[in-house]
Image: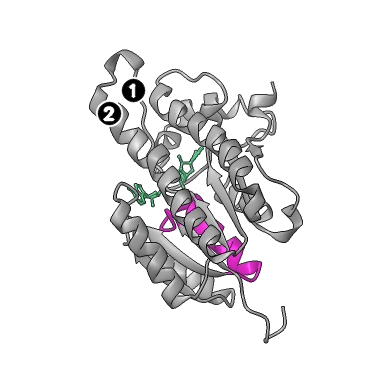
Amino acid sequence: MSGAERRPVALVTGASYGIGAATAAALARDGFDLALCDLDTAMLEETASTVRQHGGRAETIALDLRDDDSIAATVQTVTETLRTIDVLVNNAGIAFRKEALEVTREDFHRVMDVNLAGTFMMSRALGEHWIATGHPGAIVSVASTHGLHGVPTSSTYGIAKAGIAHMTRMLAIEWAPHRIRVNAIAPGSTVTPTRTGLSDPAKRDALMARFPLGRFGQPEDMADAIAYLAGAKAGFITGHVLVVDGGLTAK
Ligand SMILES: NC(=O)c1ccc[n+]([C@@H]2O[C@H](COP(=O)([O-])OP(=O)(O)OC[C@H]3O[C@@H](n4cnc5c(N)ncnc54)[C@H](O)[C@@H]3O)[C@@H](O)[C@H]2O)c1
């Protein structure tokens, strides 16, 4: 990229840890400046410093996806500080495991509010911005293999993630005339700080045995897939959910 060229800007939600932090690094490596957003801002500066090491500019922003005012303020802050947004990565989400018979209406709403409504409202805010300004855009959301096949104790989370997969197709069709591409990835188990279950050796080995490639995903595996879908090399891809699971759901 020549010095005179504008660096594209990506907004990543859930950028403090795991897949979000790795995605920010991958996009910075690919020449993006980054708006790093999270409810938990404790580690955002660490992600920002990685982005800067890759030569990118980084702004850190506190964002609560349950709050439309927070979403609107985030988009406004980014367009003021980094001037535009080219890519939205809807990565933030909450994990949730409970047997279906134990799930309360409150649990259900909490998971849907962050994982499904939050992803939709964030996408909607960017769609509105891009359509109003005539700017093309790309969205990559993070779904899950739990939204593609049945997994015990994961119904609520899986329903939300299946919703993200179908949201991807719906928004892709509605916004294609505006040059907005909408895609998603569906990760299998990925080693991130919040996946504490993987620290139990017996559970970890049993789960790993189900992965044909013989290992769990790393945040960088997901980040590379997201960066591909966000970038110009995926310019003719929209409405697609890319499964990144070491073959787990191919069996
Ligand atoms: N790790 C896995 O095995 C795995 C597998 C499949 C899908 N995923 C999905 O990948 C994404 C990232 O996963 P991870 O393991 O890196 O998770 P993580 O828990 O490390 O990161 C999720 C981030 O979302 C943020 N967040 C939560 N609620 C928020 C809110 N209301 N507003 C803004 N931010 C909020 C959290 O603060 C956190 O930084 C999630 O959507 C997750 O569901 C993860």
Q: Give the range drawn in magenta.
A: 13-32
Q: Does the magenta stretch include residue 28?
A: yes
Q: Residue 119 carries which label?
A: none
For residue 110, side relative to residue 203 (left or right): left
Q: Residue at x 51, y 62 (%)?
A: 132
Which quarter of the figure is the N terminus placed in? Answer: bottom right
Location of residue 168 in the rendering, given as x and y in whole percent from the top left corner: 57, 39
Location of residue 191 in the rendering, given as x and y in whole percent from the top left corner: 51, 43
Q: Are marks 2 and 1 in contact (CB under 8 Å)?
A: yes
Q: Which residue is drawn at 39% across and 36% down?
A: 95
Ligand 1 sits in which quadrant? Answer: top left
Location of residue 57 in the rendering, given as x and y in whole percent from the top left corner: 51, 76
Q: Which of 205 and 5 is in front in this view?
A: 5
| Kind of residue indicated by mark 1 | Lys
- State the residue position of label 2: 107
Q: Which mark is residue 98?
A: 1
Mark with earlier residue (2, 1): 1
Q: Nearer the viewer, residue 138 or 209?
A: 138
180 vs 25: above or below? above
Residue at the far top in the pictured view:
101
Location of residue 142 in the rendering, given as x and y in whole percent from the top left corner: 53, 43
116 vs 79: above or below? above
